[in-house]
Image: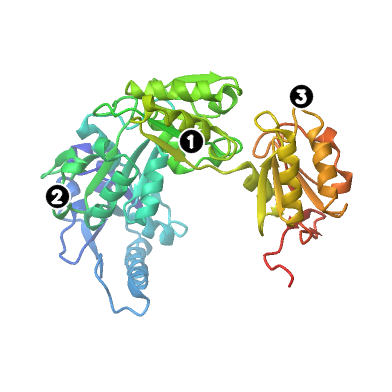
Amino acid sequence: MYGVGLGPGDPELMTLSAARVIAEADVIAYHCARHGRSIARSIAAPHLRPEHIEERLMYPVTVETTDHPGGYRGALDDFYEQAAARLAAHLDAGRTVAVLAEGDPFFYGSYQHMHKRLAHRYPTEVIPGVTSISAAAARLGTPLCEAEEVLTVIPGTLPEEELTARLAATDSAVVMKLGRTFPAVRRAMESSGRLAEARYVERATMSGERTGRLADIDPESVPYFSVAVVPSRIANPRPEPGKGEVVVVGTGPAGPLWLTPETKRALADADELVGYTTYVDRVPQRPGQIRHGSDNKVESERAEFALDLARRGRRVAVVSGGDPGVFAMATAVLEVASQDAYKDVPVRVLPGVTAANAAAAKAGAPLGHDYAVLSLSDRLKPWEVIAERLAAAAAADLVLALYNPGSRSRTWQVGKAREVLLGHRAPDTPVVLGRDIGGPEESVRIVRLGELDPAQVDMRTILLIGSSQTQVVRRGDGHEIVWTPRRYPE
């Protein structure tokens, strides 16, 4: 048995191997809808001989409903079993069978269903073919991806929210299986900010080929054999310059795994990145993108610099660790943006995974009930205020997430905080020390409040202090988990 890739439609794009296998085969099999016509057969027609035995594998359903007891999927499964049995009869009789497939047999092709059912029983070879993706790029005359860009291939049948997220998170994309899915695909392109650059290709290399801007296509005119293409950003700069804006993004506690699709898109769209050098270095390099790293203690200056760039028409991403609204850059940017000089500069804030949430997930669920978040840094507020808030939160029996607990120049705050907390909490209260969560030096330790050693805490550590209800449980593997029940005692 051969699975024969025929390419995207033009018979001249068939490979020499495909033409040879078709010519030498005894049986030519191809799938078709109930109207009986087959694009695959029409592509291979120049190579068919009168003595070929043809097996037309006609689908019982395509997109319509069915009264099959197993539903649409059940009807197709039965069809594939019956089709495979028909091909097996030829193979058992010693005939060579060539199963035709548009494009490539292993790329969203019907041939795959025959392969899964027969390849383990008979000698089988797959002849690759030019995909519709390659044909679409060629007909558009535009590269799909360059350098380190990532190409994502997406079926248009995914839910619209999933389409939007995947389009937002990738560099280049091809959306397959349009037709009735086109309206949702178009909305996803718009929601993800990709519509202006998206292109449309219909019946690439075939009669009736059509290309154009996706935004201009009438949804009622879109057939199944069409694709949406978001091409390379490097090879194809934005079709028109955008209005300057500042987007404050949270990169989470560590590297790319913690980025949301929305954040990935904002970072990819930015002309310039501004931020603390450590956080800017987490963002993948992109050709043509300018990066401005700076010290961690110049937040206002950094915000003003970003807004000045945006005022000159640049798209600027201000990079922040964790969530930009939690002891991070969103406040600094918005404070400067409130000045009259910048009131017309668009500013957006995109959330990120916070250090507290990341550490809590690694430890179990210590933040499962009410909790408070405080910073122990007295650089921007006096220690007296911190101590007062610590005491109030502890007296209220809230779980506490303590940011910025210590640094090389601040070594006494953790000890003082422990003293305040012990005035309201038992010495055996669980404390989670999460350090460098998501990073190469990640560690999560569980100690008791009375044993908390300030020397084990630095600026890369976050402390989660349990309430009177927080539990520590040792699992069967010896690993301890921490959780705070949602139900509070009467």
User: Label 2 belongs to which residue?
Assistant: 218
Q: CA distance from mark 1 to mark 2?
A: 35 Å
Q: Secondary structure at mark 1?
A: strand
Q: Are marks 1 and 2 in contact (CB under 8 Å)?
A: no
Please give the residue where the numbered disc 3 appears in the rendered image.
408
The secondary element bearing badge 2 is classed as loop
Q: Please give left or right for residue 83 compared with residue 410 in the image.
A: left
Q: Decide which of 92, 439 is in the foreground and name it.
A: 439
Amino acid type of the residue tagged 1 in the rendering = Val
Q: Which residue is mark 1?
A: 249
Q: Quadrant of residue 409?
A: top right
Location of residue 222 in the rendering, given as x and y in whole percent from the top left corner: 17, 51
Q: Residue at 25% x, 45% y: name it.
A: 227
Residue 448 visible in the snapshot:
no
Q: Mark 3 is on which residue type?
A: Arg
Along the polypeptide, which appears first: circle 3 or circle 2?
2
Q: Is residue 296 above or below residue 155?
A: above
Name the one closer to the observer, 466 or 212. 466
Residue 312 picture location, percent across and down: 33, 20
Question: Height in image: 463 above or below 299?
Answer: below
Question: Given this view, does label 3 or label 1 mark the residue nearer the observer?
Answer: 3
Determine which quarter of the picture holds residue 251: top right
Q: CA distance from mark 3 to mark 1?
A: 27 Å
How many discs appear? 3
Q: Which mark is first along the chain, 2 or 1? A: 2
Which quadrant of the rendered structure holds the C terminus?
bottom right
